Image (cartoon, grey):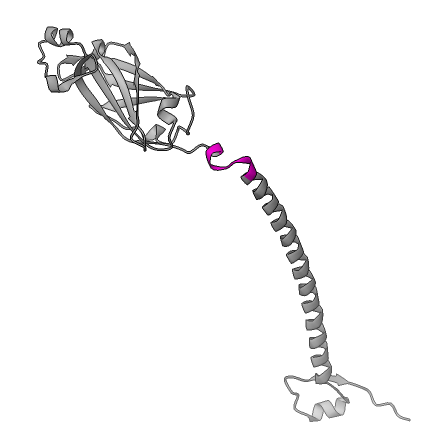
Amino acid sequence: MTLKANGKRIDCGAIAHLFSQGERHADKVAFALPRYYAGWDLSGCTFALTGENAEGKQAQQVLEKAVSEDTVTVQWEVTGAFTVTPGVLKLSLRAFTTADAAEASGSETDSDTWQEDGTLVLEYQLTDIEILPAVSAVTGPATVTLTAQTLNQLAAKLEQALAELDARAAALKLTGFENRLTTLEGRIQPVTQAEYNALTPGADTLYLIVEEVEA
């Protein structure tokens, strides 16, 4: 995973949710930085990454670097010191140079910017990332067992409810059919052809034409 700097800004969106609590040495993140910035040749600088977690505790790491014609690439091997606490992790990447190097380059040194064993050249602005809580820290074995038991009980109750629902549906269909049959029987009226021809048919009556049988 390589993140490129845009001036002094580095967007960490690609790794914003990449790390989980307790992970160590699982991922390496490279930062590709312009070799030259405001007259400084950063190839001679030492790069240090600082992370401040949700509890306000800091972790630091000096990063390995590789220099090309116009790029300095530094690599962060994510250690457990950065992932020990879940929550927001504020990152800061700084480039340092020694006082001798600063004088040789003609740059002024300021005691207020003196950091570590050298002079702070610049600090990159990195967007925050989040350390996700580890599953083991949220759900223990007892919780998993209880969840499984609960699911089994719910499944059994669901099967019982479905069986009762099927039985009720069958009963409702049968009762409905019987009701319709009783209603229909009350509307049947047997008549002869002559009687049918003489009457005005009702909309709710079923006329059954029968033949008269002479004795």
Q: Nearer the viewer, residue 83 or 18?
A: 83
Q: Residue 153 at x, y = what percent?
A: 63, 49
Instruction: Answer above or below: position of 169 versus 143.
Output: below
- Majority secondary structure of magenta residues: helix
Measuring 27% from the left and 30% from the top, which residue is drawn there?
A: 127
Q: Magenta stretch: residue 85 in it?
A: no
Side of 39 where 72 appears, left or right? right
Side of 28 where 186 appears, left or right? right
Measuring 60% from the left and 50% from the top, which residue is drawn there?
A: 154
Measuring 33% from the left and 16% from the top, which residue is drawn there?
A: 75
Q: Residue 3 at x, y = what percent?
A: 31, 23
Instruction: Answer above or below: position of 46 versus 190.
Output: above
The quarter of the picture where residue 181 lies is: bottom right
Q: Residue 174 at x, y = what percent?
A: 71, 69
The quarter of the picture where residue 88 lies is: top left
Q: Residue 120 at x, y = what percent?
A: 17, 17
Side of 37 where 207 appears, left or right? right
Q: Nearer the viewer, residue 28 or 150?
A: 150
Measuring 69% from the left and 80% from the top, which residue is drawn there?
A: 183
Which image quarter holds the N terminus? top left
Q: Which residues are magenta?
A: 136-142
